Image: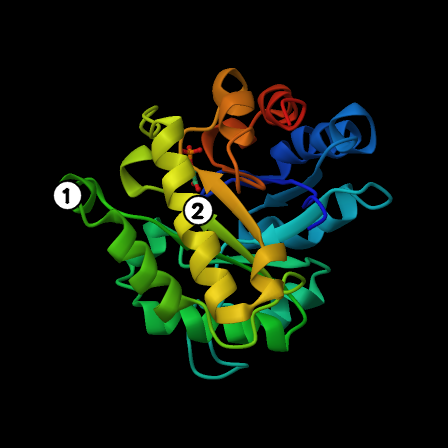
Amino acid sequence: TPAIRPLIAGNWKMHGTSASLGELKAIAEGFAGAAGQGADGLVCVPATLLSRAVEAVRGTPLAIGAQDCHAAESGAHTGDIAAGMIADCGATHVIVGHSERRTDHGESDAEVAAKAAAAWRAGLVAMICLGETRAEREAGETLAVLSRQLAGSVPEGATAANTVIAYEPVWAIGTGLTPTVEDVEEAHAHLRTELETRFGAEGGRMRLLYGGSVKPANAHELLSVANVDGALVGGASLKAVDFLGIASAV
Ligand code: PEP
């Protein structure tokens, strides 16, 4: 099987105003140069910045994404954003099922799957997030949780072109803690097997990102693990020097 080109994806979460567009431009210029040699780049910005972010990176290889979408095409859903609106801004990706959405907004696997399907209908790539909590890991349930979330959150019809899977142990997000290389390898091998079982050869080509406290200092080690096809980066995506440092570690 041909190697999968890595994707280094940033998640700005609820950070960023027009003052942040300069940093975004610096990231885009990095991916137009050395950082883009070995990896594709994506930054998922707050919805308020989508249009201006797309404008700011125009002509560079950096892709722009959103952080959530509603499952419906339109309707009486005050404050929500439809996948088609995200696409209309010129963005190409949307994160669905991030653990902060699952926790803060009680999103279920079924809701996440409906959002992924909505993203596809709008022509967006869905980045579907999953991962175990600390309690689930300590109870030895990690692989069972990943199987359940993959089965429930990834709809039929997933392809390497329309879907990216991000494995993010909840206890590693924003904490500075990371799993051991062996634990990352085990989780990714498990997810790869599940994807191939469900989607055949297509599942073998789908990008499987690791997320959770990825920094320039640990990026090379994490990105060298088998079946790790890139990283989803929160805190370290806010500064171009850090994010480009991670991309350069591929
Ligand atoms: C994330 O938000 O998906 C994430 C991995 O955050 P951090 O890199 O800050 O742990």
**Is residue 16 in sight in this rendering?**
yes
Q: Residue placed at 63% from the left, 22% from the top?
A: 249
Q: What residue type is labelled 1?
A: Ala
Which is nearer the eye, 129 or 75?
129
- Ligand 1 quadrant in view: top left
**Is residue 82 in sight in this rendering?**
no
On residue 53, the disc is none
Q: What x and y, as percent, mark residue 84?
A: 63, 73
Which is nearer the eye, 171 or 234?
171
Does mark 1's beta carbon lie closer than 8 Å to ligand 1? no
Q: Residue furthest right?
A: 59
The answer to whether residue 59 is above or below residue 150 is above
Q: What x and y, as percent, mark residue 121?
A: 62, 78
**Label 1 belongs to which residue?**
135
Q: Which amino acid does label 2 sit on?
A: Ala
- The colour scheme used here is rainbow
Q: What x and y, as percent, mark residue 214?
A: 47, 28
Q: Residue placed at 67% from the left, 36% from the top?
A: 21
Q: Is mark 2 on a helix, strand or loop?
A: helix
Quadrant showing the C terminus: top right
The answer to whether residue 167 is above or below residue 80 is above
The nearer-to-camera label among 2 and 1 is 2
**Label 2 belongs to which residue?**
189
